């Protein structure tokens, strides 16, 4: 009798296991974040419970991810310090934040800032501390991308990218981190990129700056083991709908990008920020926020790099063709070949 029951249970268990595997596969194909992030969005801490009243300083807050983050945090009830070079755009963002939230004027501070002007970083930090008394979270979001082939690109462009994306970011982090060490708590959230994990043609300088940031913050984290309440969090978005394409570096520092193309195939800025906030409140050391196929490439790059290099060569060829034909370089490989 026992053997008969066992014989029935084993096929049933196999069918259940196969069904579960297929469910996980479908879920991964449709995923827009890494497996840990997906789990925490479902079962982890919620931003709306953790972030009300927190003082959050966002750089690059005048557009794109930074702007959308300001709106979502305002709705939650976080107090905001907003920085970018364009003060008029920051005023626009602040006005909308006040319209969509219960925040008052004093809950949002505008701090005009150029990341390349390092002498201004400590005074800007002090201005926020004077206004709010503390900085709970720094979001390093300021920076620029790139669209140009290395052989066509001036070395001045690479210097400008590193000065802004890398040196500007770690310079601003220094006075803020000193404050967090004094308080023994805080979060430093850096918006890196999936290109901080992998390589990509047309973005050699941008990839280099994001790899540098990942290396820096991954090395900084173990220097802070005496401060367990200070979190170093790296967010790696894939292609996102934002103004980043209009503002990219090209072959020359002063040259603007003309190949903007259709952006509708990319992850929405709203969704990117939602997942970023989940990563933030759950203290993820690293989070991949991306649609397919870039999410799969991240996993391949980490666990099967030989396959990743082969796949990236194929995707990279299409990327360059898109760019040269006047389309957005990040148009999905599968969309283009379907």
Image: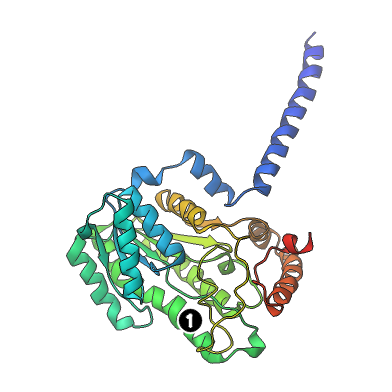
Q: Nearer the viewer, residue 175 or 238?
A: 238
| In-image side of 144 versus 176 (left or right) | right
Q: In which quadrant of the rendered image does the C terminus lie?
A: bottom right
Q: Residue at x 24, y 62 (%)?
A: 182
Q: Nearer the viewer, residue 226 or 46?
A: 46
On screen, residue 179 versus residue 30, left or right, reads left
> Residue under circle 1?
162
Residue appearing at x 30%, y 74% in the figure: 112
Residue 67 seen anywhere in this rendered image of the structure: yes
Residue 222 showing in the rendered view: no
The percent position of residue 111, horizontal first and vertical second, equals 28, 71
Residue at (75, 34) in percent of width and height: 18
In the foreground, 78 or 18: 78
Q: Is residue 13 left or right of residue 114?
A: right
Q: How is the image coloured?
A: rainbow
Query: At 80% from the left edge and 8% from the top edge, which residue is drawn?
Result: 1
Image position, residue 295 (x, y; %): 63, 57
Residue 245: quadrant of the picture: bottom right
Q: Tell me how many marks there are.
A: 1
Residue 204 at x, y = what percent? 60, 79
Q: Is residue 236 above or below residue 150?
A: above
Along the horizontal axis of the image, is 36 left or right of 225? right
Residue 77 in the image: above or below residue 166? above
Occupied quadrant, residue 137: bottom left
The picture quadrant where one finds residue 114 is bottom left
Badge 1: how crowded within 10 Å, few (<14), some, or many (20+)? many
Q: Residue furthest top?
A: 1
Foreground of the two, 199 or 319: 319
Q: Secondary structure at mark 1?
A: helix
């Amino acid at each position: 009798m026992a053997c008969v029951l066992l014989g029935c249970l084993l096929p049933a268990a196999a069918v259940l296991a196969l069904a579960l595997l297929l469910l996980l596969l479908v879920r991964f194909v449709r995923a827009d974040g890494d497996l840990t992030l997906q789990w925490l969005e479902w079962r982890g801490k919620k931003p709306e419970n953790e972030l009300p009243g927190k003082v959050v300083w966002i750089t690059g807050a005048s557009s794109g991810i930074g702007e959308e983050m300001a709106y979502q945090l305002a709705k939650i009830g976080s107090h905001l310090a907003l920085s970018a070079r364009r003060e008029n755009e920051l005023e626009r963002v602040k006005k909308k934040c006040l319209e969509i939230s219960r925040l008052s004027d004093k809950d949002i501070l505008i701090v005009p800032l150029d990341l390349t002007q390092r002498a201004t970083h400590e005074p800007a930090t002090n201005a926020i501390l004077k206004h709010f008394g503390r900085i709970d979270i720094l979001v390093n979001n300021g920076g620029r991308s790139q669209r140009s082939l290395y052989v066509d690109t001036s070395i001045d462009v690479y210097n400008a990218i590193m000065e802004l994306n890398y040196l500007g970011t770690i310079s601003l982090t220094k006075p803020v981190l000193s404050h967090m060490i004094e308080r023994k708590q805080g979060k430093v959230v850096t918006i890196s990129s999936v290109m901080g994990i992998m390589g990509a043609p047309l973005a050699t300088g941008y990839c280099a700056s994001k790899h540098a940031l990942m290396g820096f913050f991954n090395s900084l984290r173990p220097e802070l083991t005496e401060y367990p309440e200070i979190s170093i969090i790296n967010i790696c978005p894939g292609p996102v709908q934002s103004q980043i394409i209009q503002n990219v570096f090209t072959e020359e520092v002063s040259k603007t990008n003309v190949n903007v193309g259709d952006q509708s195939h990319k992850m929405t800025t709203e969704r990117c920020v939602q997942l970023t906030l989940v990563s933030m409140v759950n203290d993820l050391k690293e989070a991949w926020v991306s649609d397919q196929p870039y999410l799969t490439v991240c996993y391949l790059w980490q666990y099967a790099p030989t396959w990743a290099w082969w796949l990236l060569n194929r995707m990279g060829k299409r990327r360059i063709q898109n760019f040269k034909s006047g389309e957005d370089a990040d148009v999905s490989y599968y969309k283009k070949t379907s």
